[in-house]
Amino acid sequence: MQTGSQGFRAEGCFARDGKDQKVVCIVRESAKKEFSLNGENYEKFSAHVGKFPCVMIAPDDVQIIAGGSEERRRFLDALISQLDAKYLQQLIEYNKILQQRNGFLKSIAERKQTDLSLLDVYDEQILPPAAYIFEQRKAWLKTILPLVNEFYARIAGIKEPLVPKYESQLLHGSFKLLLKQYRDKDILLQRTLTGIHKDDIDISLDGQPFKNLASQGQRKSLLFALKLAEYETLSKSKGFAPILLLDDVFEKLDELRMHNLLDWVCVQNQGQVFITDTHRDRISSALDKLSVMHQLIEL
């Protein structure tokens, strides 16, 4: 680390499909960013998404469970974008048009405009990307959500009445019709109130909202289940295991759940795993009990 430097270079070497791959990221003094694979610069950084998938579980990820719907959409979008390059482009397009539409809704009130023809244009433009994103979310969640249930039961050690499901306004009506129905409210509140940017993964436990009822152990079990479902989905789709990073996730986790998690990621999983923990003896003892070959580095 060089304090005061205005630029930096980060380089990583990976092996994939029996071939060495070199990834380089450079931030110039001008703040310009460059990203390359095997010496060839990307024209768009989005072209790199999904090439070297990595699943990370960190303490702050609990917001996927305890936070608002935007956290669960971000999790879902990050996963599907690694599986489908078109999805990422459609998501970028949707968000761009949504921002323009919201900007126009604000200008209607500020400038007291009565000509809404531009709003009609935005409504037509936003329909195709919304339709693609909706269909892809619906299709992928049919695969992902059963995996969430499976991993949750495995980590918790018992089966519980956990029900995760996809919730979207587009499940109950066409987006085109919804935009018409909400138009007056959109103009009044100066923002778009309907669309796939309102989607959520609704999770209930014993018929009640999960985050209102679940213990800390149950919340962590669900977080691990979501992330391992992500890992398994990427593995099957890509044909190779992503890198798995567990960053200080064992604090306040009971011994059974810790054992069940490590058993899957270190014994049953064939991929590469990096684990950080603040208690050397705890992680060392847990890995020794599983007879897992490992290398401990103390920093």
Image (cartoon, rainbow, N blue to C red):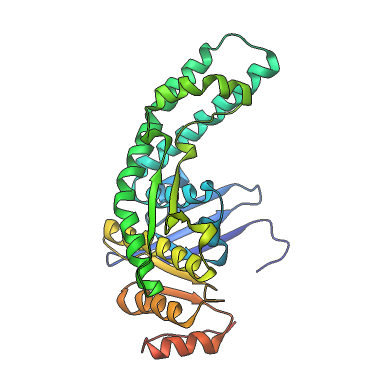
Residue positioned 39% across, 54% down in the render:
164
Q: Is residue 145 left or right of residue 194?
A: left
Q: Quadrant of residue 89?
A: top left
Q: Position of residue 292 (x, y in %)?
A: 37, 86
Q: Is residue 72 above or below residue 231?
A: above
Q: Position of residue 46 (x, y in %)?
A: 44, 45
Residue positioned 49% across, 38% down in the render:
198
Q: Residue furthest right?
A: 4
Residue positioned 43% across, 81% down in the render:
256
Q: Is residue 257 above or below residue 25?
A: below
* Nearest the eye: 151 or 85: 151
Q: Residue furthest top?
A: 115
Q: Which quadrant is home to the N terminus?
A: bottom right
Q: Total marks drawn? A: 0
* Nearest the eye: 108 or 160: 160
Residue 246 seen in the figure: yes
Q: Is residue 120 above or below residue 263?
A: above
Q: Is residue 132 above or below residue 299?
A: above
Residue 272 seen in the figure: no
Q: Is residue 106 left or right of residue 156?
A: right
Q: Residue furthest front?
A: 207
Q: Quadrant of residue 59?
A: bottom right
* Nearest the eye: 148 or 264: 148
Q: Which quadrant is home to the C terminus?
A: bottom right
